[in-house]
Image: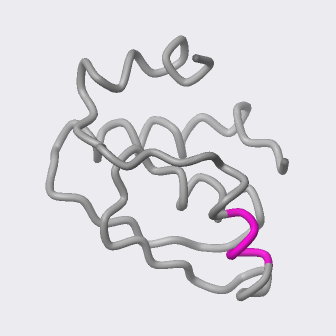
Amino acid sequence: RNLHRLYGHPRDECKASAAFPEKLPAFFIDLLTRKGDVVLDPFAGSGTTPYMAQALERHSIAIDKEAANIRLIQNRLADKRTIAVR
């Protein structure tokens, strides 16, 4: 719901069909990478994985074919005040 308020409702723009909780990519990013490493998300959707990578001080490469998803991800990653490690 917070994302909806900040960036609009994902169903209005984002075509991501497999959204998952932030804790899931955060667990694997923390387990399998170190600060400064690069995380690749080839099907970025709403950008949860690159968002959490940034929150955990990793770099990320996010790929998605939908222009609306790319705009959503860019807005999420540019808005530093919303990033908090969970």
Decide if residue 58 is on the left or right side of residue 15.
right
The relative height of residue 33 versus residue 8 in the rendered view (above or below) is below
Q: Residue at 15% across / 57% down in the picture?
A: 65
Decide if residue 14 is on the left or right side of residue 82.
left
Q: Residue at 24% across / 26% down in the picture?
A: 13
Decide if residue 62 is on the left or right side of residue 81.
left
> What is the image's colouring?
one colour
Toward the top, the furthest residue is 5
Decide if residue 69 is on the left or right side of residue 54.
left
Q: Which quadrant holds residue 25? A: bottom right
Magenta stretch contains residue 29: yes
**Picture coordinates of residue 1 (x, y %)?**
58, 17
The relative height of residue 27 versus residue 22 in the rendered view (above or below) is below
**Picture coordinates of residue 4 (x, y %)?**
49, 17
| Majority secondary structure of magenta residues | helix
Q: What stretch of residues is rendered in magenta?
A: 26-30
Magenta stretch contains residue 82: no
Name the one closer to the observer, 62 or 24: 24
Q: Residue at 37% across / 36% down in the picture?
A: 72
Name the one closer to the observer, 5 or 11: 11
Total numbered badges shown on the rendered structure: 0
**Picture coordinates of residue 69 (x, y %)?**
28, 42
Q: Residue at 54% across / 46% down in the picture?
A: 77
Q: Which quadrant holds residue 31? A: bottom right
